[in-house]
Amino acid sequence: MESPRWLREEEQRAWRAYIRMHGQLTALLNRQLQADSGLSLADYGVLVELTDTPDGRLRPFELQRELQWEQSRLSHHLTRMQRRGLISREECPEDGRGAFVVLTDAGREAITAAAPGHVEAVRSLFFEGLTPEQVAALERLSTQVTARIETAAGDCSDPA
Amino acid sequence: MESPRWLREEEQRAWRAYIRMHGQLTALLNRQLQADSGLSLADYGVLVELTDTPDGRLRPFELQRELQWEQSRLSHHLTRMQRRGLISREECPEDGRGAFVVLTDAGREAITAAAPGHVEAVRSLFFEGLTPEQVAALERLSTQVTARIETAAGDCSDPA
DNA sequence: ACAACGTACATGACACGTCATTCATTCCGC
DNA sequence: GCGGAATGAATGACGTGTCATGTACGTTGT
């Protein structure tokens, strides 16, 4: 019970700086998006995935895989987006359990209107302050950590 | 209206990787903390700040400054933590508007019990996958972005 | 002294997330 | 083909976050 292996000084600092940065950043991005277009970051993510498909329709489980959201979060969020007219739900002929999420015209208009401002915000708040090397380093770091996390999570639900 | 200056390919990739990483990471950390100690990351943050003061008491606005939370979020969260017995509120003699947030015994026990597991989770999910150079780079990146963000936010609410 | 303004904090309404549970359907071994 | 496991999805309850607003107290200028 002696030393529970605290973080080293630099790790502490990095961790706190990171948490702080992320909090501020997403808070601002969310506010900008909300104010300019009435969408949340979550809405935006869903709409982007739908827009990226040729016919603007996806099965919920595909959306889930892309967004890495909890199933119930997605379901609830789709319900809310449906209520706002951004998407609609359709039955899935080839799988009786399944469904389709379909981008509505209003949804397409919303993301089309929102995207330039949001991208500009991401750029100006985030990327313009970074060198290309930092951007590359961030991608590497994120990918590494994600891989590590996913094996850890896998081990947990599917042990030897 | 021609090109709304999209992100470059590498920026896109970095951004998506980053968002994904953060989502997974905080989801896991939250679950671990919740499962092992009944605390959320938010609770943990508040309790850490209180523990860091000699007498375990802070004014809400000080907490707010440290955590960089919205005022109402803090207020609501304190109400909930109070209901769970983790903190208590006291009146502030030298400022009739003010209050004190005080760490209770239960609160101190909770964070003491939670800390080793949480730190270990942060280490194993995050830092053990990174080199010291990456940690240093992350701190630099985060600090840069935070500084950029804060000047941007400042300009917005306090223009020339 | 007191009006005007700013600061510290709380609250109500409502959107968002998570967990546990439920339900229907499909898949798979026998 | 049938019983059981797995899969795709929805839902209710409850904790969390945000916005707008309210309220009480302090500060400052005249």
Image (cartoon, coloured by chain):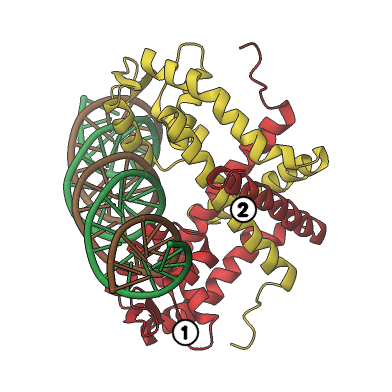
Chain colours: A yellow, B red, C brown, D green
Residue count near mark 2 (Cα–Cα under 10 Å), binned few <14, some 14–19, many ≥20: many
Q: What's the amino acid at mark 2?
A: Met
Residue count near mark 1 (Cα–Cα under 10 Å), binned few <14, some 14–19, many ≥20: some
Question: Is B140 displayed left or right of A81 in the figure?
Answer: right
Q: Specify the quadrant that holds the N terminus of chain B.
A: top right
Q: What's the amino acid at mark 1?
A: Gly
The location of residue B13, given as percent across then percent down, is: 68, 33
Indicate the secondary structure of the residue bearing disc 2.
helix
The location of residue A3, given as percent across then percent down, is: 64, 84
Residue located beneath label 1 in the image: B56
Q: Specify the quadrant that holds the C terminus of chain B.
A: top right
Decide if residue B45 is in sight here: yes
* Residue toward you, A95 or B21: B21
What is the chain identity of the residue bearing mark 1? B
Badge count: 2
Q: Which residue: 66% across, 23% down?
A: B6
The location of residue B126, given as percent across then percent down, is: 65, 58
In this rendering, is residue A140 above or below A34? below
Indicate the secondary structure of the residue bearing disc 1.
loop
* Residue toward you, B94 or C17: B94
Q: Which residue: 31% across, 38% down?
A: A76
